[in-house]
Image: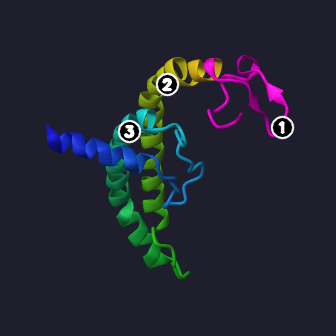
Amino acid sequence: MPLAVLLLACGGLRAEEPRPDPFGCPGGKWPWEGEGPFVNVPASIAAAPGGVVGTALALAFVPADIVEAGVSDKRRDEPIPRFAHAGVCGGVYLGKGLSYAVGAPFWLLKKAFWDWPKRLLSPDKPDREGNLRRAAGVNLLASSGDF
């Protein structure tokens, strides 16, 4: 049990780091960036099987890359060959889909029971131009740092 708590704590710290897409897949931004560990930890755990599937697809496409390298005259400087890259991106997209499916209920709970009450109960705050605005009149669906 203490090991599970330690792993979840470490996952929470890792979940807060910005996530650049190391594979260069289009649409590579992490969907729950800036939402905190309550949303990011479950979404990260749910996205993990996407990495396994992406690795399996990439390995399955290796023979196609070997054939392409044998018949093609162009020099390949890419770290991940073309067909294997397609498999990796498939896994990335699967992981993001799973993170949306699992992260959305946590996001809704966070908005309903933390962000929205916090905005409603907070005192008047100056906006970027220095004008005071009522917290209740602010767009509640905006992220918590956009006063």
**Left or right of residue 101: residue 144:** right
Disc 3 packing (10 Å; few <14; some 14–19; many ≥20): many
Which of the 4 quarters of the picture holds residue 132?
A: top right
Query: What residue is disc 2 on?
Result: 110
Query: What residue is disc 1 on?
Result: 130
Disc 2 packing (10 Å; few <14; some 14–19; many ≥20): some
Q: Residue furthest left?
A: 1
Q: Relative to residue 4, is residue 62 depicted above or below? A: below
Query: What residue is disc 3 on?
Result: 41
Q: Secondary structure at mark 3?
A: helix
Q: Position of residue 102 (x, y in %)?
A: 41, 29
Question: Which amino acid type corresponds to the residue marked 1 in the rendered image?
Answer: Gly
Q: Is residue 41 magenta?
A: no
Q: Position of residue 134 (x, y in %)?
A: 76, 20
- Do the residues under discs 2 and 1 have CB atoms within 8 angstroms? no
**Left or right of residue 29: residue 1:** left
**Left or right of residue 98: residue 25:** right
Residue range (magenta): 121-147
- Do the residues under discs 1 and 3 have CB atoms within 8 angstroms? no
